[in-house]
Amino acid sequence: MRRRASSSIAANPVLIGAATVLVVIVAVFLAYNANNGLPFVPTYELKVNLPNAANLVQGNDVRVGGTRVGTISRITPKRTPDGRYYAQLTINIETDLDPLPRDSTFLVRPRSALGLKYLQITKGTSDEGFPDGATVPMANATPTPVEFDEFTNMFDEPTREASQVNLNEFGMAFAGRGADINRAIEELNPLLVNLVPVMSNLADRRTNLGGLFQALERSARIVAPVAEQQAALFRNLDTTFRALAEVTPEIQESIERGPEALDTAIEGLPRQRPFLRNSAALFRELRPGVRALRTAAPDLADAFTNGERSLRRSVALNERLIPTFDALVRFAENPATELGIQDLQTTSDLLRPTLAHLTPAQTVCNYVTLWFRNIASLLSDGDANGTWQRFMVIVAADGPNNEGGPASAPANGPTAINHLHTNPYPNTASPGQPRECEAGNETYLPGRTVIGNQPGTQRLETEKTRRSLDD
């Protein structure tokens, strides 16, 4: 007896495949339209007039009390009869808000410091509401939003410079002094304990602390007419004592040794008179020769000064070089040295083809120098706290197979800018390649997908390197 073929869907691979494809299509469709709201879900549509869209884009959130209730589906520029322009937003929000009270307010708020915005709705208390499809007048766009750049622009240039100075000075004052600050706070405890009886004594009426300040006030009033003269006196004294403070040890030493020096001078100066007379005669006779050496004196002085230091150091240098030359002798007599030199020669022979292929990248196209220069400048900006990296964010073009996410194929349109241009192994004038410096000289071909070297010969030059084909 034959069994009947099962009529279940699970037994039919064609139906199973069709159902799987349908589920995938629905999931992709829902994911693609997630920012614009789920399909087949009823929404409440309003048109909102704003004096300025303030960097809003289609798909931005609409929020009530910080909760996302809808999205912006369209932004349209409008013109008033007197010639002014404003923005009209078409928003789709949840039907739970239908109808929205007529005294509700609309405000563009920043969502992040990078410029992302959203539309905030503050619900009113009116009994009347906006019907579906109604237009919200511009009077409900209150209060006027304040942008971050407007906030920072309220500080004029002197204020900004003063803020920079304050930030730098306060930062430098506390930088590296954490331990000292902790120690100061620790030492404040006994100070405050001992300060209690002192402050109690000062607060006692018998101390008459108020009378002290009254007496100081009278004294200041008496000397006020000569305040400028006193200030000048103290300024001059400060200059004098600052100069004396720099030579305090010498002044002290001269005072201590002054009596001995005077006694020695009384005894020795008479004996020096014949020597001084002979020295005066010698200098008179040397005057013509010194006059002739006038032009060469600076060079001779430098030569003697530098030569004296060099000769003095040469002795120690020669002594330090003895172990070095001994080590060189042992190294030259070591049998393994010859084997090492042979290995180095073999390494050089093996590297010669690679170096011959890579050398033109520097000698012709200057790529190595440019790479080090650019790497050095990558972290060249900074302040007292350190350096930061300079970079530029490039947003991928919209469209299928774009470079902003996973794709089934290289970027290939349909727009002119949504095309992949990549060249992992550009020509660098190496042996077997066209004589060109292709990296950094590729031209962008709009509307075409280019992978690899571009057609034609590019320029034989890079930044700060200019050579022609005749070179």
Image (cartoon, rainbow, N blue to C red):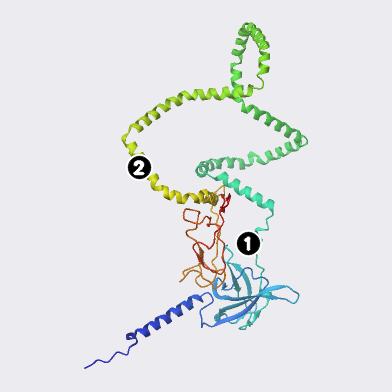
Asked whether 339 or 378 is in front, the reply is 339
Left or right, 121 with reference to 340: right
What secondary structure is marked by label 2? helix
Residue 77: x %, y % from top left: 67, 74
State the residue position of label 1: 148
Residue most extreme to the right: 225
Q: Relative to 435, is 339 above or below? A: above
What secondary structure is marked by label 1? helix
Image quarter for residue 142?
Answer: bottom right
Residue 239: x %, y % from top left: 68, 31
Q: Residues within 10 Å of mark 1 (few under 14, many from 20)?
A: few
Left or right, 2 with reference to 387: left
Asked whether 313 or 142 is in front, the reply is 313
Residue most extreme to the left: 1
**What's under tag 1, amino acid-wise?**
Phe
Image quarter for residue 222?
Answer: top right
Residue 4: x %, y % from top left: 27, 92
Residue most extreme to the bottom: 1
**What's under tag 2, amino acid-wise?**
Asp
Q: Nearer the viewer, mark 2 or mark 1?
A: 2
Q: Residues within 10 Å of mark 2 (few under 14, many from 20)?
A: few
**Residue at (37% x, 84% y) in the render:** 14
**Residue at (51% x, 49% y) in the render:** 362
Asked whether 327 or 164 is in front, the reply is 327
State the residue position of label 2: 343
Q: Relative to 310, is 394 above or below? A: below
- Residue 368 visible? The answer is no
